[in-house]
Amino acid sequence: MTKISQRLAGILCGCAFVVAAALPSFAADSNTLAQVKKRGALNCTGHNGSYLGLAEVDDKGNWKGLDIDLCRAVATAVFGTWEGHLNIIPISWAQRWPLLQSGEIDAVIKSSGWTASRDTELGVQFSNVYVFASQKIMVRKELGATSVKDLDGGSLCVPAGTSTEKSLADYMKRSGVEMEFVVSEKTEESQAAYLSGRCDAYGEWDVQLAVLRLKADNPDDHMILPETFAAEPTSMVVRENDDRWLDLLNLTLSTMLTAEEAGVTQANVDEMKANPPSPRVAKMLGVTPGFGAPLGLSDDFGYNVIKRVGNYADIWERNLGRQSPYKLERGTNALWQNGGVLWPILLD
């Protein structure tokens, strides 16, 4: 063997060693899926109380909400149905990360903001964004305000020490609007202060503003102003170095967004499967093979998700939108082609 051949052989052996060294890490990527299948159920997050519209318990003791439906979608992707295969575990905000790291929770789907410190310090990975938490301001209609600038010189209730307070201060400075901040240590105290008339306006995530509006004696006396002063990306969260499990969550979400984009709903999915309007829909619904196998799923997992849970518009409307008590518009959380910022991974 020549020196060049020997050197080439050494390089190839080194490359093979690198690939071999990487294989255990890749194999470990499917650990969560294997554990979920072995257990026969997905352990997903609930809320230790009621986070209305997102994770709440109805008067019959059943869980509902946007976050809960996403838990159902992931369980359905794995098992073909979520019924009998999903454990919703009520936890506090502080319990999210230790329970995920210990393996007691398989995924955190609990209105969790994607921040740099969490991403780099907690040993977790974030999915694509499923909700942008648009921070807005609610006012009494009697003020006649139609924009934030109309509130110049007024007062604003906001929970103390929150990202909302900081974002509002920055927004007011940029807009040249001066308002007195009425701060309280607890969110409930800030909300009560606004409802009692101690301040002219209240600032928080639009989902919670919609819920707070319903708590008022006369909800029609209040309105949410159109400006969005900040938007916090909210994602599903898994353990770090669990890439295939993260792929599964991302493609489950993208299936729901793609279905909305293509007009495939919970009501018409059987018709769409029988007569797919495009190659992409045929692949998503399992008519064309190959969609689920790389994830360790059945090829028709997308069909099952839409059939059992719905597309993204289905779960938004029944939990937060027109079919819910909250009547919240999609706004920032519409699909990109409808003026929002949500988008799916291309299912090609």
Image: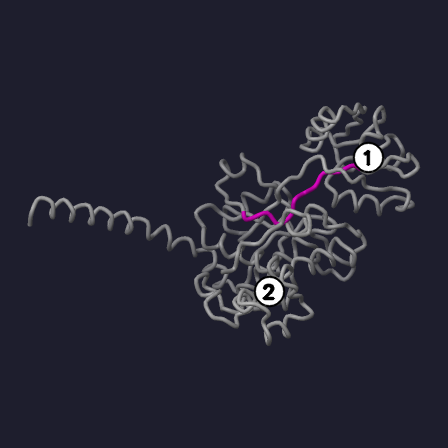
Dot 1: what SS? loop
Q: CA distance from mark 2 to mark 1?
A: 40 Å
Q: Residue 144 or 188: which is nearer the viewer?
A: 144
For residue 305, the mark is 2
How far across and how far down the image is residue 206, in percent?
74, 43
Q: Magenta segment, which residues?
A: 127-137
In which quadrant of the rendered view does residue 226 lie? top right
How far across and how far down the image is residue 284, in percent?
54, 65
Q: Amino acid at mark 2?
A: Val
For residue 147, the mark is 1
Report whether 25 appears left or right of 72: left
Relative vertical location of residue 35 with respect to residue 241 in this rendering, above or below: below
Magenta-drawn stretch contains 86 = no
Q: Dot 2, crowdedness within 10 Å: few (<14), some or many (≥20)?
A: many
Dot 2: what SS? helix
Point 80% across, 27% down: residue: 182
Give the total number of marks visible in the rendering: 2
Report whether 262 appears left or right of 320: left
Magenta-drawn stretch contains 128 = yes
Q: Residue 118 or 179: which is nearer the viewer?
A: 179
Q: Dot 1, crowdedness within 10 Å: few (<14), some or many (≥20)?
A: few
Q: Amino acid at mark 1?
A: Ser
Point 80% across, 52% down: residue: 327
For residue 65, the mark is none
Report whether 292 appears left or right of 310: left
